[in-house]
Image (cartoon, grey):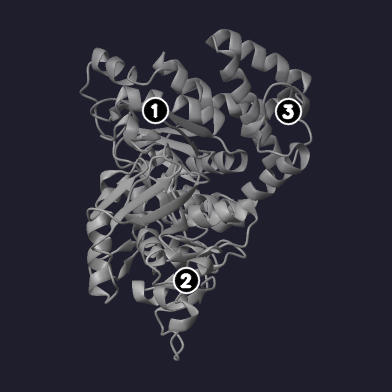
């Protein structure tokens, strides 16, 4: 048979659309043509496949006109993932493997010149796509990628180390070997995963009881947080321990997070079901932060999905990068649109940001005098726009400990104790309204916050005095509801609103 069809998958955002690799062998001048909107990496497959087939002792049809089409033609294809399906297509078209037995399988893998199979990005996304289609298609992948794809429940994954291991499974009946296949081919079952995720412990942070209280509120309600304080006050330590306060990940959340990490080539089994903390450097561009490129790749905000995005030295980030955060903070998704293609990535993260109060860092510090002029302070703080600050629920001042306090202070409260309280409050909110307090929108805010009359009067007065926007007022209400949940209160009382106002008023008024 001179025509063969082999199934594979491309990557577009978090989707893995099906690709049919069509191979046709015809008489004529010998050539090897690859069509179907293939990227440079894919076009280089011609040389890899030719060398791999020859070095594996298989026959390459030199005297034929070979045409390989990657359908659909308008879907962009990148990376070396199509090496293995192209090789199998050539072998099927030339009768070296049984084409009829390939129909229940999908293939992906990069070939070395010797025929060894190398891992590919996005194996987990491919496996998830098959699960969503609810089909029993079997997926053949290289070592590393196969173990990753097998994390999806009930997936049919096969690992092959070498091209010959794959060929041996699909030989025509007349050529089937007398001996069973070697160790290179195996059905992959989910590996033993870490029993629980491990995070740095908050007991490492001495003192800072007020800061830990705000972290507890942020974890309980899903709120974003901005920490302001001098250098060395503990802002980074607090932020890096925040993920440990969040509830354990569900299987669906763990799969989504792992699939995004797999797209970026960052997934490791050791970090399975561990809430990510993405910490991009302040020189990161807007594209690095939100994602982009062609084809679009996930940015840091998507890599922080179901976890924490920690932006240290917040005013030092490029203005365009910070402004790009505004929409995903509200919607939980980021859409990257290009002329030919549109990709959507999930980006439901908790933003933890940290900054110094001024360029030298010591404005308001008791330890050292600030040497910045009022104009420098104003210019530094104004790098953060009002709309962005408006979208950050909690603003907290982190003060430095004296050397004496630091050396004599006992270990702080550990992460486990704080997490139990924040999870209990979060469960109350989920039971009441089906989402975290941060997720409340529109009419649901009035329905579930249940403000008492003195609290309404107080909030009206504060919002009027400080000139708050409707968004600021609503976000304060959500924080107050979280504080009420931590106190196991049915209604939101004056004390809860007063504490919520305290986490917003001082810093916003100093910035404007």
Specify which label sits upstream in the sequence, 2 or 1. 2
* Callouts 2 and 3 close, C-beta under 8 Å: no
SS at badge 1: loop
Q: From this viewpoint, is residue 351 visible?
A: yes
Q: Earlier in the sequence, mark 3 or mark 1?
A: 1
Q: Residue at x 54, y 62 (%)?
A: 103
Q: Is residue 69 left or right of residue 193?
A: left
Q: Mark 3 falls on what kind of element? A: helix
Q: Which residue is mark 1?
A: 338
Q: Quadrant of the C terminus?
A: top left
Q: Which residue is mark 3?
A: 449
Label drawn at residue 505: none
The nearer-to-camera label among 2 and 3 is 2
Left or right: 8 as drawn, with respect to 488 = left
> Residue 332 in the image: x percent, y percent?
54, 34
Residue name at image x 42 percent, y 53 percent: 21
Q: CA distance from mark 2 to mark 3?
A: 65 Å
Outermost bottom residue: 178
**Front: mark 2 or 1:** 2
* N-terminal-most mark, 2 or 3: 2
Q: Residues within 10 Å of mark 3 (few under 14, many from 20)?
A: many
Q: Nearer the viewer, residue 203 or 43?
A: 43
Counting every numbered tag in the picture gives: 3
- Rendered image: mark on residue 98: 2
**Toward the viewer: 159 or 273?**
159
Q: Is residue 138 left or right of residue 355?
A: right
Q: Mark 3 or mark 1: which is in front? A: 1
Q: Position of residue 38 (x, y in %)?
A: 33, 44
Do residues under tags 3 and 1 come within 8 Å of each other at their CB atoms?
A: no
């Amino acid at each position: 048979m001179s025509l063969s069809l082999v199934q594979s998958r491309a990557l577009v955002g978090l989707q893995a659309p099906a690709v049919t690799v069509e191979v046709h062998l015809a008489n004529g001048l010998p050539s090897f043509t690859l069509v179907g909107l293939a990227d440079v990496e894919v076009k280089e497959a011609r040389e890899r496949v030719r060398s791999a087939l020859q070095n594996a002792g298989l026959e390459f049809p030199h005297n034929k006109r070979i045409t390989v089409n990657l359908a659909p033609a308008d879907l962009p294809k990148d990376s070396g993932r199509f090496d293995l399906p192209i090789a199998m297509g050539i072998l099927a078209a030339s009768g070296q493997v049984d084409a009829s037995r390939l129909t229940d399988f999908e293939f992906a893998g990069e070939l070395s010149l010797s025929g060894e199979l190398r891992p590919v990005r996005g194996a987990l996304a491919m496996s998830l796509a098959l699960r969503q289609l609810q089909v029993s298609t079997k997926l053949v992948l290289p070592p590393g990628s196969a173990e990753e794809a097998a994390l999806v429940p009930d997936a049919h994954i096969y690992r092959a180390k070498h091209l010959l291991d794959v060929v041996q499974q699909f030989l025509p009946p007349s050529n089937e070997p007398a001996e069973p296949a070697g160790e290179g081919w195996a059905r992959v079952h989910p590996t033993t995963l870490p029993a629980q995720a491990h995070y740095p412990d908050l007991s490492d942070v001495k003192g800072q009881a007020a800061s830990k209280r705000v972290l507890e509120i942020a974890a309980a309600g899903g709120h974003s947080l901005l920490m302001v304080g001098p250098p060395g006050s503990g802002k980074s330590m607090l932020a890096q321990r925040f993920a440990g306060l969040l509830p354990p990940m569900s299987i669906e959340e763990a799969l989504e997070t792992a699939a995004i990490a797999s797209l970026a080539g960052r997934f490791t089994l050791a970090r399975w079901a561990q809430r990510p903390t993405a910490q991009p450097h302040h020189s990161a561009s807007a594209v690095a932060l939100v994602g982009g490129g062609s084809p679009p790749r996930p940015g840091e905000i998507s890599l922080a999905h179901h976890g924490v995005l920690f932006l240290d030295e917040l005013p030092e980030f490029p203005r365009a990068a910070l402004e790009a955060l505004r929409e995903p903070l509200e919607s939980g998704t980021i859409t990257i649109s290009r002329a030919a293609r549109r990709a959507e990535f999930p980006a439901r993260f908790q933003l933890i940001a940290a900054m110094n109060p001024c360029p030298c860092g010591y404005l308001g510090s008791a330890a050292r005098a600030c040497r910045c002029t009022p104009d420098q302070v104003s210019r530094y703080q104004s790098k953060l726009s009002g709309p962005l600050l408006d979208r950050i629920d909690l603003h907290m001042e982190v003060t430095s400990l004296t050397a004496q306090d630091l050396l004599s202070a006992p270990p702080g409260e550990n992460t486990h104790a704080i997490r139990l309280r924040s999870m209990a409050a979060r469960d109350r909110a989920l039971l009441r309204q089906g989402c975290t307090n941060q997720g409340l929108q529109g009419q649901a805010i009035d329905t579930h916050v249940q403000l008492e009359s003195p609290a309404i009067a107080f909030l009206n007065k504060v919002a009027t005095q400080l000139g708050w926007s409707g968004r600021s007022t609503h976000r304060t209400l959500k924080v107050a509801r979280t504080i009420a949940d931590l106190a196991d209160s049915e209604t939101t009382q004056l004390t809860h609103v007063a504490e919520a106002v305290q986490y917003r008023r001082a810093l916003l008024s100093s910035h404007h």
